[in-house]
Image (cartoon, coloured by chain):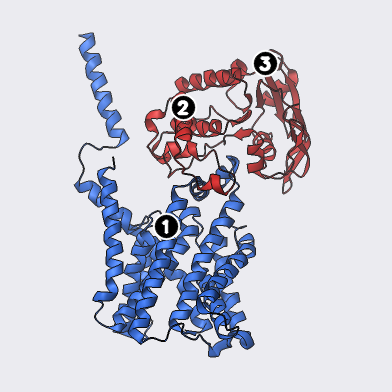
Amino acid sequence: MPSGSKVLKLAAVALLAVAVLAFPSIAPNPYILSAGVLVVYYAVLATSWNFVGGFTGYISLGHGALAGLGAYSTGILVAKAGLPPFLALAAAGAFVGLLAVPIGLAALRVRGASFVIVSISLVLILLLVFQSWSSVTGGSRGLVVPRPFQLTRPEHHRIFYFLFAGLLALAVLAWWLIDRSRFGLGLKSIREDEDKAEALGTATYAYKLIVFVVSAVFTALAGGLYALWFGDLDPVFQFSILTGSYLVLMALLGGVRQLFGPVVGALIVGIALEFFKVEYGDTPLHLVATGLLLALVVLFMPDGVLPAIADLIKRFGRSDRTSIREVSAAELREQRLQNAGGTK
Amino acid sequence: MTLETTGLSKAFGGVTALDGASVSFHQGEVNALIGPNGSGKTTYFNCVTGMIKPDGGTVSYQGRDLTGKAPHRIARAGIGRTFQLCRTFPRMTALENVLSAVPPTGLIGGLRSARGRAEIERAMGWLTRLGIEHLAGSEARDLSWGQQKLLELAGVLMAEPETVLLDEPAGGVNPALLDRIGVLIRELNAEGRTFVIVEHNMDLVMSISDHIVVFDRGRPIAEGPPSQIRTDERVLGAYLGV
């Protein structure tokens, strides 16, 4: 029999799914719809990031580069090689997955802050490559990717909204599968104490590499879909450390241990980013706000919004559930009373 | 054939931690590895289990050469270990801590649920045996020091190692628990497990060991049964400086 909290969880998931699916119909204008596409795009990226960040605790600031690789691979295959758009997308996913093996082999040798630095360097190196190699990438002038459908602008947004939502569902499903699996338990033991996990027989290096490749494939697919949707790629935006930083903020804000943590984070940060861009235009104020938000999250909600809400619900709904210490203290009192009664 | 090292050496910078340690432990017995602080006992454990690579020498186990192998391969060869400062996975429940000691091999095994009935039963069996089954749902960081030591041991035993290396099982443990740990080691040994124990508590060492190896300055200086070690002049010299 499913427990009360399980029913509540399922209901929340169903509600989220309905809200996501209903959004295009209630969006008042194409701009809001396009902002919705962007938010779902971020949700896919943040969930993909969380395969590495959430399970193993390796904080990558370089996932923007993997998305950029996926975008450019798709774009180049369509624009220069003339491949059908969605075949190009699949090929780009496979290509970045393969490329993630040597990248992961190099980057996952180091831990903690060193890994963060290596992941940043990945973005910077690729930015230089894609800016300079203009015969293939179009360089700083950018790359125009032909649209896959001949549709009006609102229809175009609408279709891509659902494509991104489908990819999001796939990523969430994959994360859920790993989360409950023995492989996932191994990954989480790496997050807790990598040397200890290794001493217990977990092949930590292989585990990290596998999940890095899975993460890279989903990230690249999201990037490729973005290329087909947006239709114009610029190295400065595709290979930007900001993208990776946004993903970290979203995942941390929502909660990296929660299936829907990154989605909730993307919803909050994505909407906030759009709001700041509309209200304050091109000023760097949105960067200040994001930085402030990140600091507040790390200081006050290190586990994210979702666990904080769960704690709040628990506090209001507390009944017979108490901590271990309280139980043992109560037992102790009872024992003492019994002993006192016995010696009388 | 059993756990055996020949000429194992390791230096950190200019400090020699292991100086050609050749040791052969007795299979099926409780072996103790003792020696003054800094005599290389923990470094020896770390070299044997692959946590650090020795500068020279060999490690072999049941005829297999394990020198320089990755720690998880050595663990899978049947050597389990605990750490000097007990290490558990703090933000996992006690049950999950024990369950993560049987990492899967292959894709199908990896995608199976982490909460398989057989595994949970086995894990609960170990928690029960160590007397901490009532804490199965608590996160390891909420357990007391002694409970964490028992939990770490439960995890190591879950992997069914034939040989168990314990690094200071008595460290920071209260006298009642100390007795229990002593009894437990003898019981587990009677079931066929080989133990190698690094320990400073001489009462425990003398009461549970069959065979004692004494380290000083990175190499063995004496070995034998407790009765012999107790009166060995070199041992007294190393410990007391006489």
Residue at 29 percent across and 43 percent down: it is A2
Alpha carbon separation for disc pair 2 and 3: 33 Å
The image quarter containing residue A249 is bottom left
Alpha carbon separation for disc pair 1 and 2: 33 Å
The image quarter containing residue B58 is top right
Residue at 54 percent across and 57 percent down: it is A211
Visual hue assigned to chain A = blue
The label number, if any, that marks residue B226 in the structure image: 3
Kind of residue indicated by mark 1: Leu
The answer to whether tags 1 and 2 share a subunit is no
Kind of residue indicated by mark 2: Gly
Q: Quadrant of the C terminus of chain A?
A: top left
Label 2 environment density (alpha carbons within 10 Å; few <14, some 14–19, many ≥20): some
Label 3 environment density (alpha carbons within 10 Å; few <14, some 14–19, many ≥20): some
Residue A303 against residue B41 in the figure, above or below: below
Label 1 environment density (alpha carbons within 10 Å; few <14, some 14–19, many ≥20): few
Q: Mark 2 belongs to which subunit? A: B
The label number, if any, that marks residue A173 in the structure image: 1
Q: Are marks 1 and 3 in contact (CB under 8 Å)?
A: no
A239 on left or right of A150: right
Closest to the observer, A129 or B111: B111
Relative image position of residue B161 (x, y in whole percent) = 61, 31
Q: Mark 3 belongs to which subunit? A: B
The answer to whether tags 2 and 3 share a subunit is yes
Relative image position of residue A89 (x, y in whole percent) = 52, 74
Q: Report whether residue A89 is seen.
A: yes
B78 on left or right of A159: right
Residue B71 against residue A173 in the figure, above or below: above
The label number, if any, that marks residue B125 in the structure image: 2
